[in-house]
Amino acid sequence: MKKINGAQIMWECILKEGVDQIFGYPGGANLPIFHHMTEYPIHHVLPRHEQGAAHMADGYARASGKVGVALATSGPGATNLVTGIATAMLDSSPVVFFTGQVSSPLLGYDAFQEVDVVGITMPITKHNYLVTDVRDLTRTIREAFYIARSGRPGPVLVDIPKDVQNAVIDWEYDDAPIQLPGYKSDPPIKAGDMEMALELINKAKKPVILAGHGVLLSGAMQELLQFSEITLTPIATTLLGIGSVPASHPMNLGLMGMHGEAWVNQAIQEADLLLAFGMRFDDRVTGNLKSFAPSAKKIHLEIDPSEINKNVKVDLALLGDIGDTLRQLIPQLERVDREEWNEHINDMRIESGKRDIKNIKSDKLHAAHVISDLSKLADPNSIVVTDVGQNQMWAAQYFMREKPYSLITSGGLGTMGFGLPASIGVKFARPNAEVWCISGDGGFQMTMPELQTLKQENIKVNIIILNNGYLGMVRQWQELFYTRNYSGTPLSSPDFVKIAEAHGLTGILVSKRSEIENAVRQARETEGSVVLEFKIEEEDLVYPMVPTGAALHEMIRRPEMIP
Amino acid sequence: MQHTLVALVENKPGVLTRVTSLFQRRSFNIDSLTVGRTENPGVSRITIVVDADKDNAGRLITYLNKLVNIVWVEDITDSPKVSRDLAMVKVSVNPANRAEVMQLVDVFRARIIDVGNDSLMIEITGSEEKIEGFIETLKPFGILEMVRAGVVAMGRGANPLGNSVGSGNGNGIIPGGNGKVL
């Protein structure tokens, strides 16, 4: 037993959870927490905006596999977290958010900087808490971390009023088993369903695996490959599934969906069996649901029962952790000859490759050139963090990812401004890894002040800005579907080289393809963070593209020649 | 069609908000919702009547199950059950028709709980159909005020709802989905 206050209890508890890194912004309602922080072996990073703290903790969680922690004050501090919390929610990222709150006697009286953050974040957290009694704090924090990381992971918020932070009690850590009678994180697998699955798998002639984020969250990369190699089933990945299979692996097809390669989407449409591993049939993946994989039986391996039959009706669902399910399935799989199917897909791949802009010689600077050159020049163990938009799709298409957890991106919510702060979190999670942040001129300007966080922390992230002078993805839709009426999308930018220099960092400007190699080498060799601005073609499009409402195979293909 | 869902929830602040906010977020309309205490002081019971097709009712169950404070949830629409609503109706009467209204109260096995000079307050419990029938019958007399408590429902037989509740983490049921061949 020791006499400590709520703020100290919070630190004691998060240390017990293995936390040594937090991202937080101080304010009136979390002063006691910050006051006591210095007593504990915690490294704190000060972002320049609470949204930055949220994305940093999220990036940290995704790159480390540990729970990320962000901290903000009440009121505006808490509301500034909201975009980051929703980002973590939509991508099942385990982050615990702590917010200071006005003292509990003032709750409900519109006190200075009071906001009902538990009410606001209810639909965008896996669970959240308001702690009004300091004696509940230990149990609450333990539950918060447990919920965040177990089952399908997700963000949990804990709101702590200032009087609870200040309240002193006789305390010792309570490690009694967590009691959550209503928390159903780990559904059991039924044996009968396994047999049915095996029958469908062994019978299939044209199967395709759809590998999603769940494979990475479950750590089932080895099992995925085994399954694929035994059954000769090619693997298409979702955006967040990139890295679940090495890009160069012969069974890897690549990205599927709206900007998936033609052979990938075509294979899905022709398949007679889809094996969905930890993915949720997002609309960006399926295209028009009515015409999605019309002749395929569908088996869904998924930990979250609410995803079953949500968007796509499946023939069989195997609930549970994907790794567990695959480990049960693998010993019973039959080797079936599927050479013909794989050759057919390969033929489609060769045809598409001829259209690929990265294989076409051009004097102009195309984003595809930048990313595919970078992919060859960067450290093979590097981690890529993207922003959202065209830059994100080009990174997904052209940055070949061989290792798991090496592409970090906001998929579900599509949060512009995610890239830079998330890359800072990633660097703290994997300090020895080379980190590349790939951003556009739009998204970068949303969270640009975090450059100074890089400087203050003296860490190295290489930041690519693909500058095309437009909010490129929206411009692309305007070009294709809105009579080329570029309403609201032209965008001016500051001199990014000078911006970098003003923050005490290095800036490099590239406007020709021949300069890419040197610039990348220079960035890698430079101590400290580097901003590389690439002046790319203004009206480049991300190809292929499945227009909204179209079937997955009705893609706008790459032109065979650059116009 | 109407589905009747029954949920056992932890008796904690904000649980009802979590449930109702879920309906709003997932675009479901609540026809009736009641919440009250149970034989277990730590557990409240929510009865929800919702207009949804079978697939959507199934989806709703899986979403409700994801709420950490929901211990058990079940769609009892097709199970043998008794469901009851309660209504209080204030109806306008005059010396000429008072006796007629009192007779109707008897026929419907309702009760008069307050008598005024120009009004009667009537309490009726029963199935929704019975209550609606009663209200229709009273309409011609002039309904001054009416309130309904909402539907509560309970399965028939000895087996209580959520038999294995409290047997530890992760032991809640996972309705729908698992092994479902369409």
Image (cartoon, coloured by chain):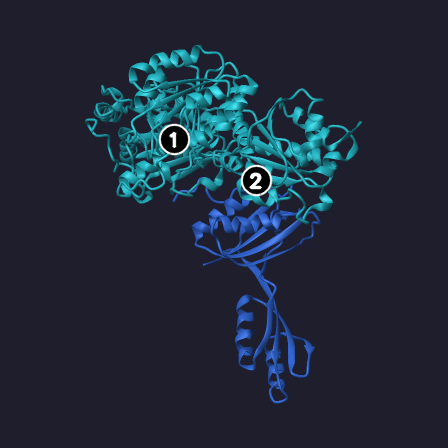
Residue named by callout 1? A238
Q: Chain of mark 1?
A: A
Any idea which chain is the blue one in this picture? B
Please provide percent x and percent y for residue A528: 49, 14
Is the N terminus of chain A in the top left, top right, bottom left or bottom right quadrant? top right
Query: Residue flagged by tag 2: what amino acid is it?
Result: Thr
Q: Residues within 10 Å of mark 1 (few under 14, many from 20)?
A: many
Left or right: where does residue A286 sit relative to residue B159? left
Left or right: where does residue A341 sit relative to residue A3? left
Q: Say whether residue A205 is visible.
A: no
Q: Looking at the image, which is closer to me, A306 or A110?
A: A110
Residue at the top extreme? A525
Q: Is residue B115 above or below residue A284?
A: below
Residue at 57% in and 77% down: B143
Q: Nearer the viewer, mark 1 or mark 2?
A: 2
Any idea which chain is the cyan one in this picture? A
Please provide percent x and percent y for residue B79: 52, 55
Please provide percent x and percent y for residue B85: 59, 65
Residue at 22% in and 19% down: A361
Q: Looking at the image, which is closer to me, B37 or A155?
A: A155
Q: Residues within 10 Å of mark 2 (few under 14, many from 20)?
A: many
Left or right: where does residue B27 sit relative to residue A170? left
Closer to the chain start, of discs 1 and 2, is: 2
Q: Chain of mark 2?
A: A
Q: Looking at the image, which is closer to me, A487 or A151?
A: A487
Residue at 59% in and 71% down: B146
Left or right: where does residue B116 sit relative to residue B59? right
Q: Secondary structure at mark 2?
A: helix
Residue named by callout 2? A79
Q: Secondary structure at mark 1?
A: loop
Classify residue A98 by image quadrant: top right
Is the C terminus of chain A in the top left, top right, bottom left or bottom right quadrant? top left
